[in-house]
Amino acid sequence: MTDAQQGEIVATEAAKKRVAEILRDEPEGSWLRISVTGGGCSGFQYNFDIAQAAEADDLILGEGEARIAVDRIALDFMQGAKIDFVDDLMGSSFRVENPNATASCGCGTSFAV
């Protein structure tokens, strides 16, 4: 596992807090794992899944109760991104501010590069 370095993908305190809340109801040792796949209305989409373990080459963003892992393939698409958790009038969700995205959809889950 690779620890996050400055200038790479970061998770806000709000995102880490929400991850910790989610993982409390999951089996011990679970992780929130973020990946990127083809699809969505803009070409690529973010996936947020609960995994039983992080992969050896995942980027680790959180620790303790807020265990966040980013899939190795997603790193190429998400360099410099900020993962946040927002609770507003539109609803609550994880949001990715991705400087590499040239376009994104209104729901914020898909993007183009």
Image (cartoon, grey):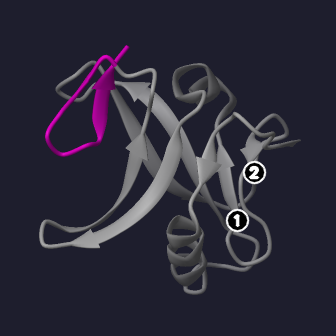
Q: Is residue 31 left or right of residue 34?
A: right
Q: Quadrant of residue 94?
A: bottom left
Does residue 91 lie above or below 27 as drawn?
Answer: above
- Residue 77: % across, % down: 52, 22
Q: Is residue 91 left or right of residue 75?
A: left
Q: Which residue is mark 2?
A: 54
Instruction: Count the numbered circles shown.
Output: 2
Q: Disc 1, disc 2: CB below 8 Å?
A: yes
Q: Report helix, strand or loop for mark 1.
A: loop
In the rendered image, which quarter contains the C terminus?
top left
Q: Which residue is mark 1?
A: 67
Q: Is residue 51 left or right of residue 90?
A: right
In-front residue for pair 82/20? 82
- Residue 21: % across, % down: 54, 83
- Residue shown at the point (25%, 43%) measured from the top left: 108
- Residue shown at the point (40%, 39%) measured from the top left: 46
Does residue 29 lie above or below 108 as drawn?
Answer: below
Q: Report helix, strand or loop for mark 2.
A: loop
- Residue 20: % across, % down: 60, 78
Magenta residues, as a range? Answer: 102-113
In the rendered image, which quarter contains the N terminus?
top right
**Closer to the observer: label 1 or label 2?**
1
The answer to if 109 sits in the magenta stretch is yes
Q: Residues within 10 Å of mark 1 (few under 14, many from 20)?
A: many
In-front residue for pair 35/88? 88
